[in-house]
Image: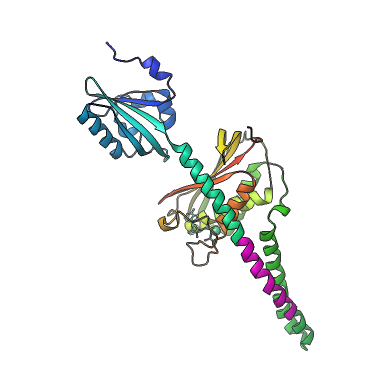
Amino acid sequence: MPDFSYLTLDSLSTAVILVDGVLHVIYLNPAAENLFEVSGKNLLENSLQLVFTDTGQLANAMQRALHDNASYIEHELVLTTHAHNKLQLRCTVTPLPANRLLLEFHPMDRPLKLAREEQMLDQTQASRLLLRNLAHEIKNPLGGIRGAAQLLEQELDKPALREYTQVIIQEADRLRALMEKLLTPQSNTRHSALNIHEVLERVRSVVLAEMPEGLTIVRDYDISLPALIGDKEQLIQVVLNIVRNAAQAMQGEGKIVLRTRVARQVTLFKQRHRLAIMVQIIDNGPGIPPELRDKIFYPLVSGRADGHGLGLTLAQDFVSQHSGTIEFDSEPGRTCFTVMLPLQAASE
Ligand SMILES: Nc1ncnc2c1ncn2[C@@H]1O[C@H](COP(=O)(O)OP(=O)(O)O)[C@@H](O)[C@H]1O
Ligand SMILES: [Mg+2]
């Protein structure tokens, strides 16, 4: 006599896995296949370790359930899938007859994701303020430097020396233009329909030209993606900054994958979007140093001796001007930056 109906479990939206006494999978419902990105058929009679890479915390919960012969709830379970996705879950383990265990998983990533996005928004605003103040501070003395160089130029007898004053004047002008950009980022944006792959192709050719040997940039494009409304120059800068970082981290030797996918029903900054474009930049370099992971989007944070620490700050600023998000996941051998850009007008 079956003690429950698989049919009922099949239609549940909660992810459910049934295991036997030696932790082999007896049953896995479609919600679990979805959540852990696995196919149930291949897993039946196989170890639970084929579903996720780290089962330690879960093994502990299972032991307790068996020991108490009662349901045990693990409120903060962290599991990594074989597709490298880290999941935060609440898990209920229920002992069943014949040494079997029923595992129910409830994802908790919504509140965590929201908290992360809010933090990112705060951070972007703080970064923007800092950049504006910095730009202001730099602009003022620049005017003085330029004026002094002009006066000096008039006093010079040898025309050959003017070359030097011209360098000062031109560089001061270039810096001023850059500072203007930082002070008024919005005023220069031009939104129009664009193809994200044109953006990626441009970045690909620029970075390959900079690092001609040893670097491979693989395209993994979903060419059916619809057009996106956005500022092409800004988006090029976003992807360029991320890809350059990857290339620099690998010292020009390694592989970068540029991946595009469509994402449906995504929630970004509390807004629900029917469609979004997901761009992933994945490298097989050394990974982001652990001590930098919490702050790489802050201005002036750099892990490189000659870095300015502005690349990711600007990237984040530009992406948030497109109502999108940037996130990353990094470990030695694999760093993935994910940029989500909403396609449709926000609903609700
Ligand atoms: N793909 C990556 N792999 C390893 N480290 C990275 C990667 N992307 C960013 N970083 C780290 O983040 C830091 C900040 O990047 P960024 O804001 O572009 O500033 P900068 O490139 O001027 O240092 C880098 O210096 C580097 O230490
Ligand atoms: Mg950089």
Does 144 appear in magenta? yes
- Asked if 284 appears above or below 148 in the picture, the reply is above
Q: Residue at x 77, y 84 (%)?
A: 159
- Asked if 198 appears above or below 4 in the picture, the reply is below
Q: Residue at x 34, y 26 (%)?
A: 17
Left or right for 48, reference 343: left
Of the pair 156 and 265, the residue shown nearer to us:
265
Q: Residue at x 57, y 53 (%)?
A: 124
Left or right for 297, reference 163: left
Outermost left residue: 67
Of the pair 96 and 49, the residue shown nearer to us:
96
Residue 127: percent from the left, percent from the top?
A: 57, 57
**Could you tell me what secondary structure mostly forms the magenta stretch?**
helix
Left or right for 82, reference 163: left
Q: Quadrant of residue 292?
A: bottom left
- Asked if 137 appears above or below 46 in the picture, the reply is below
Residue 64: in sight, yes or no?
yes
Q: Quadrant of ligand 2?
A: bottom right
The residue segment tinted magenta is: 131-148
Looking at the figure, which quarter contains the C terminus? top right
Residue 28: percent from the left, percent from the top?
A: 36, 24
Q: Quadrant of residue 166?
A: bottom right
Residue 211: percent from the left, percent from the top?
A: 55, 58
Does 162 appear in magenta? no
What kind of colouring is applied to the model shown?
Answer: rainbow
Left or right for 90, reference 253: left
Outermost right residue: 154
Residue 119: percent from the left, percent from the top?
A: 51, 49
Looking at the figure, which quarter contains the N terminus? top left
Residue 257: in sight, yes or no?
no
Count of numbered circles on the image: 0
